[in-house]
Image (cartoon, rainbow, N blue to C red):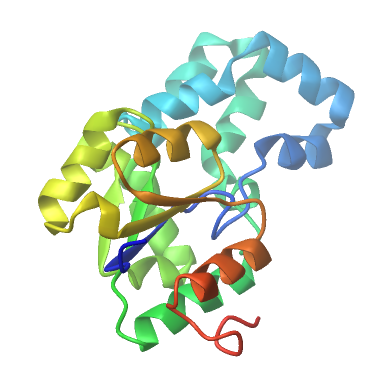
Amino acid sequence: MRTVEAVVFDIGNVLIEWQPERYYDGRIGEARRRELFAAIDLHAMNERIDAGGLFRDTVYDCAAANPDWATEIRWWYDHWIGLASPRIEHSITLLRRLRAKGVPVFALTNFGDDAFSYAQTQYEFLNEFDRAYVSGRMQVTKPDPMIYAAVEADCAIAPEALLFADDRADNIQTAAARGWQTHHFTGPQGWADRLVAAGLLTKQEAMP
């Protein structure tokens, strides 16, 4: 296996939990949330933001178009940190320990441009990447091969020397098809073990 020259982190469900349904369950109950998500494709709305749509405008336009659910739809913007939380502290520790050892650490995330800028004011570690590849800025989302090609072109690191963690299998599969080393993230301990196996951290350094 080729030596890793940079480690690439997804953000949602790798560094920050992203479970919008859980947030809505807490606000309106599971039955009502299921009704909402069946009536309005909020994940498709979010994908438009990830692809470059303005965060507030996209959410508020969707709310205006669906007055029966307008209040609940606006929560996606008004209470976004409630949806995008809590932090995954062990993963953040791994990011910081890699950087402390001089390993370049990148982000590759499906995230709106202005949403990411806001998130950086709420989560300090989002300012700590050596390079941040944000889909809303790039106008292309994972798993489109174009976003991976853009990362390769920008960082000038061979695909085989990139190690990428993402919680979505389709995102991992596209990266692997391009030659990237990959890890399907299901929890921070598995990711820690992979970083140790790659020789990037010691077992002690990979502890929470």
User: Is residue 112 or residue 155 the one in the foreground?
Assistant: 155
Q: Could you tell me residue 79's position as x and y percent?
A: 59, 46
- Residue 113 position, x and y percent, is 30, 44
- Residue 155 is left or right of residue 115, and the answer is left
Residue at 61% of width from left, 46% of height from top? 18
In this view, the residue farthest toward the front is: 1
Disc tally is: 0
Task: Give whichever of 32, 134 is nearer the camera.
Answer: 134
Image quarter where the N terminus lies is bottom left
Residue 92 placed where, x, y %? 53, 72
Decide which of 169, 158 is in the foreground and name it. 158
- Above or below, 102 against 41 in this view is below
Please say if 151 is above or below 136: below
Q: Quadrant of residue 61?
A: top left
In percent of the image, x 41 and y 79: which residue is there? 98
Left or right side of 177 for 168: right
State left or right for residue 37 relative to residue 163: right
Residue 151 in view, yes or no: yes
Q: Residue at x 38, y 24 (%)?
A: 48
Residue depicted at x 53% and y 19%: 63
In the image: residue 41, left or right of residue 131? right
- Quarter in which the C terminus is drawn: bottom right
The answer to whether residue 52 shows anywhere in this view is: no
